[in-house]
Image: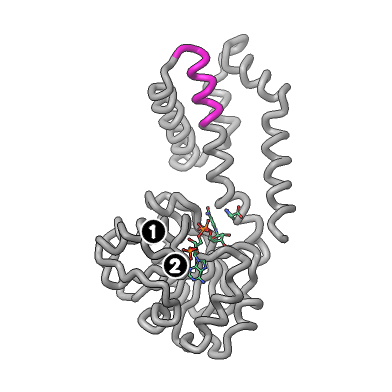
């Protein structure tokens, strides 16, 4: 990748993106990460990444700007960087609930603006990133896609689905981790120590995902292969459903969706 990238907001997601890029061989010299508490970015500094609290300076040196601050901070950041943003810049916002139109309203130079919704698995190059833009040139789309392809898998979506992408893909990491925690707790109750239960639960979740990813089957088709008539799997699964398992998940997803806007 030839681009110089500035990540504005080196927090949980900004650092995950930075780590993911570096582990794919992206040059530390071409990467800048900003935040106020720069001491919390020392591991990046050690690797040769330019670490600064000066957003304007970071933007000046970059051709791709990734904004990764909290939604309530984006307007002040846009005001701060606005004088340095040029038409040639690719500006990617990973900020939830802030539209391309709202971003453009703060910029006079008309850069090409994208929204992307990666997740924290960017740090291990296993993100699912949904990308949206309005009338971006194919060559710019290719650049943005290549950045997030380095961090995992990408899908292009319409911007109207960005809130849904935020919930399913980004919040989704937390839902799955809570599921894994539940499996671990159950595993300990039936006899495993915490480490062994964690090893079994995490690999089992990975394997179940791979069955769908690699074979493209419907989850129920794979479930049918596990459930022996009158067996323990179906007994446990039905008990989970009696407790509202799928329903709780669906309701939680809808509740997250309803809570995106402040
Ligand atoms: N976390 C996640 O899983 C995901 C988050 N997102 C979105 O990404 C954005 C960031 O989320 P997340 O990483 O969790 O949040 P964090 O609070 O962890 O990170 C945001 C960072 O921005 C820095 N910051 C604040 N103000 C400025 C500023 N003026 N200039 C530069 N840096 C600044 C803060 O550091 P300091 O105080 O040192 O300045 C902070 O570390 C949010 O909009 C969120 O919606 C999207 C997908 C997934
Ligand atoms: O919970 C949040 O607000 C952010 C958005 C996506 C993931 N975390």
The reply to whether discs 2 and 1 touch (Cβ–Cβ < 8 Å) is yes
Residue 241 falls in image quadrant: top right
Residue 42 falls in image quadrant: bottom left
Disc 2 residue: CB within 8 Å of ligand 1: yes
Residue placed under numbered mark 1 in the picture: 40
Disc 1 residue: CB within 8 Å of ligand 1: yes
Q: How many marks?
A: 2
SS assignment at label 1: helix
Asked whether residue 185 is drawn in magenta, I would say: yes
Q: Which residue sits at x=43%, y=22%?
A: 194
Say above or below: 190 vs 22: above
Q: Residues within 10 Å of mark 1 (few under 14, many from 20)?
A: few
What stretch of residues is rendered in magenta? Answer: 181-191
Is 131 or 49 nearer to us in this picture?
A: 49
Along the horizontal axis of the image, is 190 left or right of 17? right
Residue 35 - label:
2
SS assignment at label 2: loop
Q: Quadrant of the C terminus?
A: bottom right
Q: Which residue sits at x=68%, y=49%?
A: 256
Asked whether residue 138 is drawn in magenta, I would say: no
Q: Return the x and y of residue 159 as percentages of the image width and height.
A: 63, 67
Say above or below: 168 vs 145: above
Q: Return the x and y of residue 233 as percentages of the image width and height.
A: 57, 17
Q: Return the x and y of residue 9 as percentages of the image width and height.
A: 47, 66
Along the horizontal axis of the image, is 142 left or right of 44? right
Q: Return the x and y of residue 173 as percentages of the image width and height.
A: 53, 45
Residue at the limit of the structure toward the top, as seen here: 230
């Amino acid at each position: 990748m030839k681009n110089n990238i500035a990540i504005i907001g080196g927090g949980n997601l900004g650092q995950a993106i930075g780590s993911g890029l570096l582990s794919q061989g992206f040059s530390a010299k071409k990467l800048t990460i900003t935040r106020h508490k720069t001491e919390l970015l020392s591991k990046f500094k050690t690797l040769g990444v330019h670490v600064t609290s000066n957003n304007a300076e970071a933007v000046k040196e970059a051709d791709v700007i990734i904004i990764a601050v909290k939604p309530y901070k984006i307007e002040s950041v846009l005001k701060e960087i606005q004088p340095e943003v040029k038409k040639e810049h690719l500006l990617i916002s990973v900020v939830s609930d802030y539209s391309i139109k709202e971003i453009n309203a703060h910029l006079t130079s008309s850069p090409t603006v994208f929204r992307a919704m990666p997740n924290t698995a960017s740090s291990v190059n296993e993100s699912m990133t949904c990308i949206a833009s309005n009338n971006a040139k194919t060559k710019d789309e290719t650049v943005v896609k290549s950045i997030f392809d380095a961090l995992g898998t990408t899908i292009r979506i319409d911007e109207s689905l960005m809130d849904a992408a935020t919930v399913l893909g980004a919040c989704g990491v937390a839902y799955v981790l809570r599921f894994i925690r539940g499996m671990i707790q159950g595993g300990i109750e039936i006899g495993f120590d915490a480490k062994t239960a964690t090893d079994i639960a995490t690999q089992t979740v990975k394997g179940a995902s791979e069955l769908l990813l690699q074979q493209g089957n419907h989850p129920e088709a794979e479930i049918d292969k596990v459930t022996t008539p009158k067996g323990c799997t179906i007994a446990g699964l039905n008990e989970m459903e009696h407790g509202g398992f799928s329903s709780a998940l669906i309701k939680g997803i809808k509740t997250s969706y309803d809570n995106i806007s402040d």
